[in-house]
């Protein structure tokens, strides 16, 4: 019975552990879903506040799915009008290779185009693709976050990849 | 293996070493590789990170009354734990422990009963039954909504505050919400008793008492829509739809200039709140907006 009491997330230490375990993943999920403009930093706090307010009703084992459900259901003001804005890390030119300025510019153009395509993707495709390729999460882990099967995750990643491939075909690489 | 299947397998890491070598020599491989590796340039942590726990805690405590501070709980919990252990021991030895399963808003769950009957609970619902006595008496209490697949055997009772449902080996849905009691039979025969009404339902029949008005209906569904993450309504007061919406998405909805008794026919999915809001407002020519605390307000067009 004492073991169950340790799993009560109303206890400060347990809640802190839940926060530290999941805050990055929930934050990243929101960032990939809605982009930068939406301020994922604040929204992830809202999700954890909701968890704390419901701490009596949610067991430790259900905390992760609760957080992701809350995150998915956030209704956003003006979401219909604001476009998704992501960002990409600019490539720093390597001084020890002989990369021409033209090559560096082409790389930058590649990533600008890539970013535009990502922003235009269907939300669910973008989230699955970036959780896998940017965060390195496995298909199984992503399936758990989203509450879908592994096959669905694989299909979404493939869909995103196909659209990217079609759009970026024009770039000559190496 | 055609090109697309190869790509799928490559993305899933399912190519054999031999197949992979071949794939990597394809003429488009450089592009594929660039796309996959390029994903890392978009990693969230380069641009935004969540706050550390202590910052979260300070921000929360600044927003709320002191009584909700996290540290206050611990000594309280120790006192409560002694009481809980004592009661627990008492109930184990002196009481018939009841098994309870409960769902909160936006949660659904499946439960298997001792005789392998299956119960799927909709959001914000609860069932209660005695595991020990189940073989002798298949009777459970329900508050809310659940879909039942009953294994063949003795009679099976679902007891709610607004009526009792008795069945033998069938599939049916029971819904008990505010002033709304409804039973839908999908297979077999179901007997429903509520107040002065008693009816036998066959597959496809449904029995409903809404605001003390009794109606019967038939449908061709093989199982309730909500188990497929969809809610559908046929000529029901708008407030019934809003109540279910609030349950599925765990939000609060208020109305401005809208009659909550208007009849609504239609439905919404449970997986995307923006689409769902459009599904319940557009057909009625209504609009919605969200306010600062993420509650939804549905308003009519001023004529």
Image (cartoon, grey):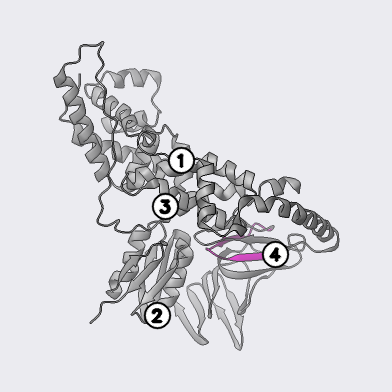
Q: Which mark is residue B129?
A: 4
Q: Residues within 10 Å of mark 4 (few under 14, many from 20)?
A: many
Is B151 situated left or right of A21 in this image? right
The answer for how far apart the CA atoms under marks 3 and 1 are is 13 Å
Secondary structure under tag 2 reads loop
Query: Magenta span covers which residues?
Result: B115-128
Secondary structure under tag 3 reads helix
Q: Is residue B221 above or below residue A109?
A: below
**Residue B257, position as x, y percentages in the image:** 33, 80
Mark 2 lies on residue:
B260
The answer for how far apart the CA atoms under marks 4 and 1 are is 38 Å
Q: Chain of mark 2?
A: B
CB-based contact (under 8 Å), mark 2 and mark 4: no
Q: Which mark is residue A72?
A: 3
Same-chain status of marks 2 and 1: no
Q: Residue B38 sits in which quadrant? A: top left
Residue at 33% over, 60% down: B275
In front: mark 3 or mark 4? 3
Q: Is residue A79 above or below residue B301?
A: above
Specify whether residue A6 is painted magenta.
Answer: no
Of callouts 3 and 1, which one flags the residue occurring earlier in the amino acid sequence? Answer: 1
Residue at 25% over, 22% down: B30
In front: mark 2 or mark 4? 2
Of callouts 2 and 4, which one flags the residue occurring earlier in the amino acid sequence? Answer: 4
Mark 1 lies on residue:
A25
In front: mark 2 or mark 1? 1
Residue at 76% over, 49% down: A1
Q: Nearer the viewer, residue A55 or B152?
A: A55
Q: Nearer the viewer, residue A27 or B13?
A: A27
Q: How many marks?
A: 4
């Amino acid at each position: 019975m004492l073991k169950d009491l340790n799993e009560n997330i109303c206890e400060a230490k347990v809640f802190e552990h839940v926060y530290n375990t999941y805050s990055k993943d929930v934050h990243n999920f929101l960032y990939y879903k809605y982009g930068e403009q939406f301020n994922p930093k604040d929204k992830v706090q809202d999700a954890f506040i909701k968890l704390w307010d419901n701490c009596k009703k949610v067991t430790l084992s259900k905390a992760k799915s609760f957080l992701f459900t809350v995150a998915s259901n956030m209704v956003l003001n003006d979401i219909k009008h604001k476009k998704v804005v992501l960002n990409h890390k600019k490539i720093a030119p390597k001084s020890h290779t002989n990369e021409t300025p033209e090559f560096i510019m082409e790389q930058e153009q590649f990533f600008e185009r890539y970013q535009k395509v990502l922003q235009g993707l269907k939300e669910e495709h973008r989230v699955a693709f970036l959780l896998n390729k940017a965060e390195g999460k496995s298909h199984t882990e992503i399936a758990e976050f989203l509450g879908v099967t592994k096959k669905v995750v694989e299909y979404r990643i493939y869909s995103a990849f196909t659209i990217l491939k079609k759009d970026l075909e024009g770039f000559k690489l190496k | 293996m055609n090109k697309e299947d190869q790509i799928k397998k490559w993305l899933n890491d399912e190519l054999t070493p031999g197949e992979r070598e071949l794939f990597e020599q394809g003429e488009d491989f450089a592009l594929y590789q660039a796309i996959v590796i390029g994903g890392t340039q978009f990693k969230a942590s380069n641009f935004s990170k969540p706050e550390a726990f202590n910052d979260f805690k300070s921000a929360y405590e600044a927003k709320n009354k002191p009584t909700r501070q996290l540290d206050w709980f611990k000594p309280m919990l120790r006192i409560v734990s002694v009481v809980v252990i004592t009661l627990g021991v008492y109930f184990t030895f002196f009481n018939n422990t009841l098994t309870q399963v409960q769902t909160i808003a936006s949660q659904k769950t499946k439960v298997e009963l001792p005789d392998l009957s299956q119960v799927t609970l909709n959001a914000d619902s609860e069932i209660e039954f005695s595991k020990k006595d189940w073989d002798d008496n298949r009777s459970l209490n329900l508050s809310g909504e659940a879909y039942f697949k009953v294994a063949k055997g003795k009679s099976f009772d679902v007891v709610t505050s607004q009526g009792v449902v008795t069945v033998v080996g069938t599939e049916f849905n029971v819904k008990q919400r505010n002033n709304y009691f409804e039973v839908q039979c999908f297979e077999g025969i179901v007997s429903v008793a509520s107040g002065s009404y008693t009816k036998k339902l066959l597959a496809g029949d449904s029995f409903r008492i809404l605001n003390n008005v009794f109606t019967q209906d038939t449908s061709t569904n093989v199982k309730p829509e909500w188990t497929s993450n969809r809610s559908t309504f046929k000529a029901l007061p708008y407030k019934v739809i809003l109540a279910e919406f609030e349950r599925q998405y765990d939000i609060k909805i208020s109305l401005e200039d809208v009659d909550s008794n208007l009849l609504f026919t239609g439905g919404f999915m449970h997986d995307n709140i923006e689409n769902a809001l459009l599904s319940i407002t557009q057909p009625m020519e209504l609009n919605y907006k969200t306010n600062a605390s993420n509650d939804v307000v549905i308003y009519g067009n001023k004529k």
